Image (cartoon, rainbow, N blue to C red):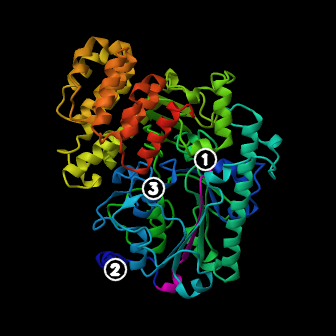
């Protein structure tokens, strides 16, 4: 496929910025995993031991307002490799691996190769995209062939460090180099020994990651390539202690970005001299276009984002937009708008806690200790809210005074105008990028398959995906206002399952206040959409019609429902009172790694293991 793709895009090498190969810069992109900016010394953390990254910041330009669009790795890398938002491609759920139209959407290494660049990747792919091998687009995939790089100029080489990955915070937390007594614990965490120790363990992991970054920089210098290579360092999203990675808060998305540009490319400097900071707002979706621009490659029109560096620099965006959907085997759904100071978040599932049990997250000692502390009744209003249903469907935080995002300003009249503007910006952006997440995951996958199209194409066909109608219905639903009940009753009868889904979600949020339209809910018993039926069953349970709710859920299980993840999640949310469904749960044969995992979590709960 690679050669065919290159043939299609070889014409993009026209209009080069650089006259000769010798003038074109090499690019070395050094990525790390899971660490937000707050874990690095050059971003103000006095406890962090990151001398190599700190030195890189002194030699380069440190960006202070850089935000991941997704608080987890796999969809982020899908956005990077295509230059298109994961949410726009339909690949935002963790490791969903949905196909995209590869004949129309190349990967950026294809375009760099057409420009004459050698492309290498060591060694992380995980693009979350089906229909094409992740390694197909690279000239070299695997351990860096450092000694051959001088012969392969100009080159674009990615080196990924896994040493700061979340997994490095798992396991025992004793005997750390970092002293747990020196740790500053986030305000949303209880200040207890096991959490302090886990912080210390991760500080050690970040120190190890810094050494790997240093080794790559030293190798570049040893080979005599530093003077004609632009070096970029950033993490792949934020994290990594509980309530950061995956959860779409400030430290979930605020990331480091350092760019070192040699003297010979001084015309590309974003500030007067190295060592300076740059406060321009940068979103991760901006990176592919920007790196391509630095090489002189022509950029295809389907790429999203804004060029933030070099001769092709475009006007600065006011906001960066974020999104989070299914993470592993846990369902939640949010969107966000991040400016340089204020951060607005919209929660599409306020009826579930942030802290739903997730097998991977609970491998961390800090998560288990936090949960135990909460179950013992020792958390307070701030440290305990993680395990409770969300109190609001909207949030606004002043990240300058409240970087931990614990004081929600959404009801503060002083911010009313700002909130209205950020809401409007989010709506416009969702329509612009064709937000694919306004149908629940299993419903949209079925609809795309039934119509023989990719999700990418489906959400661009208003006959198959009525995004304005879904956005309107979703806003009505999450408003949680009883005055909207007559309109919700009308929407429960809508011909589009997406609209009905949001209408029944609105009833779920209203709970007992929605009882006056009980008959309209009962009419959903045989709804064609299993997602609609699962949420309707949960609503019935919440308003006291528990036997009927379990009957509906049992029928879904017995039908081997395509909406297994949603059905199992509803059963998990109900908890012990759903035990009569145990035989049907055991007989269910779900597809997909994470649905199987959710089934195991539910079975463990009924076995007393959760």
Nearer mark to the viewer, of 3 and 1:
1
At a point 25% along the width and 20% down the height, the residue shown is 521
Task: Count neighbours of disc 1 (C-alpha within 10 A) and say few if under 14, some if 14 to 19, many if 20 or more.
Answer: many
In the shown orientation, is residue 193 left or right of residue 237?
right
In the picture, residue 302 is in which quadrant?
bottom left
Q: Which mark is residue 3?
A: 2
Can I make out residue 385 in this image?
Answer: yes
Query: Which numbered disc flags the more N-terminal residue, 3 or 1?
Result: 1
Q: Is residue 423 magenta?
A: no
Q: Secondary structure at mark 1?
A: loop
State the residue at coordinates (60%, 77%): 264
Reply yes or no: does residue 24 show up in magenta: yes
Write down the residue under mark 1. 239
- As drawn, the label of residue 285 is 3
Residue 468's image quarter? top left
Which element type, helix, strand or loop, lies under badge 2? helix
Query: Is 6 in front, or is 593?
Result: 593
Q: Which residues are magenta?
A: 20-36
Q: Is residue 32 left or right of residue 422?
A: right
Q: Measure the C-alpha gap from mark 3 to mark 1.
A: 19 Å
* Rendered image quadrant of residue 262: bottom right
Q: Residue furthest bottom?
A: 151
Residue 322 shows in this picture: no
Say whether disc 3 or disc 2 marks the residue closer to the N-terminus.
2
Residue at figure coordinates x 39%, y 29% from the top left: 581
Q: Quadrant of the C terminus?
A: top right
**Residue 549 percent coordinates (x, y):** 33, 22
Q: Secondary structure at mark 3?
A: loop
Distance from Cα at disc 3 to Cα at disc 2: 26 Å
Tag in front: 3 or 2:
2
Position of 272 with respect to 465 (left or right) is right
Can you say whether 278 is above or below 468 in the image? below
């Amino acid at each position: 496929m690679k050669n065919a793709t290159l043939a299609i895009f070889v014409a993009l090498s026209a209009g080069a910025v650089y006259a000769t190969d010798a003038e074109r810069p090499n690019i070395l992109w050094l990525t790390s995993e899971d660490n937000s900016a707050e874990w690095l010394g050059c971003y103000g953390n006095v406890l962090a031991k990151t001398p190599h990254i700190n030195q890189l910041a002194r030699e380069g330009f440190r960006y202070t307002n850089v935000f991941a669009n997704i608080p987890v790795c796999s969809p982020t890398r899908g956005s990077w490799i295509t230059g298109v938002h994961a949410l726009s491609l339909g690949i935002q759920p963790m490791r969903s691996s949905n196909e995209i139209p590869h004949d129309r959407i190349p990967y950026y290494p294809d375009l760099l190769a057409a420009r004459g660049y050698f492309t290498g990747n060591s060694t992380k792919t995980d693009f979350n995209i089906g229909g094409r091998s992740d390694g197909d687009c690279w000239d070299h995939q695997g351990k860096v062939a450092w000694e051959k790089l001088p012969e392969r100029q100009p080159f674009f080489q990615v080196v990924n460090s896994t040493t700061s990955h979340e997994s490095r915070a798992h396991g025992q937390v004793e005997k750390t180099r970092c002293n747990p007594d020196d740790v500053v614990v986030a305000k949303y965490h209880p200040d207890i020994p096991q959490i302090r120790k886990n912080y210390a363990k991760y500080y050690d992991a970040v120190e190890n990651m810094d050494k790997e970054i240093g080794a790559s920089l030293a190798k570049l210098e040893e080979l005599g390539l530093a003077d004609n290579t632009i070096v970029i360092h950033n993490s792949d999203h934020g994290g990594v202690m509980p309530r950061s990675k995956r959860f779409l808060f400030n430290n979930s998305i605020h990331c480091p970005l350092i760019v070192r540009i040699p003297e010979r490319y001084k015309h590309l400097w974003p500030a007067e001299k190295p060592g300076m900071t740059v406060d321009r707002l940068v979103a991760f979706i901006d990176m592919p276009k920007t790196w391509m621009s630095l090489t002189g490659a022509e950029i295809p029109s389907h790429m999203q984002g804004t060029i933030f560096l070099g001769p092709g620099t475009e006007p600065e965006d006011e906001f960066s937009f974020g999104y989070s959907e299914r993470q592993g085997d846990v369902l939640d759904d949010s969107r966000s708008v991040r400016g340089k100071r204020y951060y607005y978040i919209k929660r599409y599932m306020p009826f579930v806690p942030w802290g739903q049990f997730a097998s991977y997250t609970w491998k961390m000692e800090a998560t288990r200790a936090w949960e135990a502390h909460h179950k013992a009744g020792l958390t307070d209003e701030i440290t305990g809210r993680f395990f409770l249903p969300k109190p609001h469907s909207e949030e606004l935080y002043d990240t300058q005074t409240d970087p931990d995002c614990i004081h929600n300003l959404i009801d503060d009249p002083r911010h009313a105008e700002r909130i209205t503007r950020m809401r409007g910006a989010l709506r416009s952006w969702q329509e612009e990028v064709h937000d694919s997440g306004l149908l629940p995951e299993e419903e949209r996958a079925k609809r795309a398959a039934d119509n023989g199209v990719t999700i990418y194409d489906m959400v661009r066909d208003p006959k198959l995906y009525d995004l304005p109608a879904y956005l309107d219905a979703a806003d009505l639903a999450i408003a949680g206002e009883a005055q909207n009940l007559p309109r919700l009753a009308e929407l429960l009868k809508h011909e589009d399952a997406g609209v009905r889904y949001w209408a029944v979600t609105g009833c779920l949020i209203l709970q007992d206040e929605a009882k006056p339209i009980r008959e309209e809910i009962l009419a959903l018993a045989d709804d064609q959409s299993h997602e609609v039926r699962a949420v309707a069953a949960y609503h019935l349970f919440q308003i006291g019609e528990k036997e009927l709710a379990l009957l509906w859920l049992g029928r879904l299980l017995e039908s081997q429902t395509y909406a297994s993840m949603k059905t199992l999640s509803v059963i998990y949310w109900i908890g012990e009172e759903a035990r009569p469904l145990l035989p049907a749960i055991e007989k269910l044969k779900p597809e997909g790694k994470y649905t199987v995992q959710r089934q195991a979590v539910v079975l463990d709960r009924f076995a007393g293991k959760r």
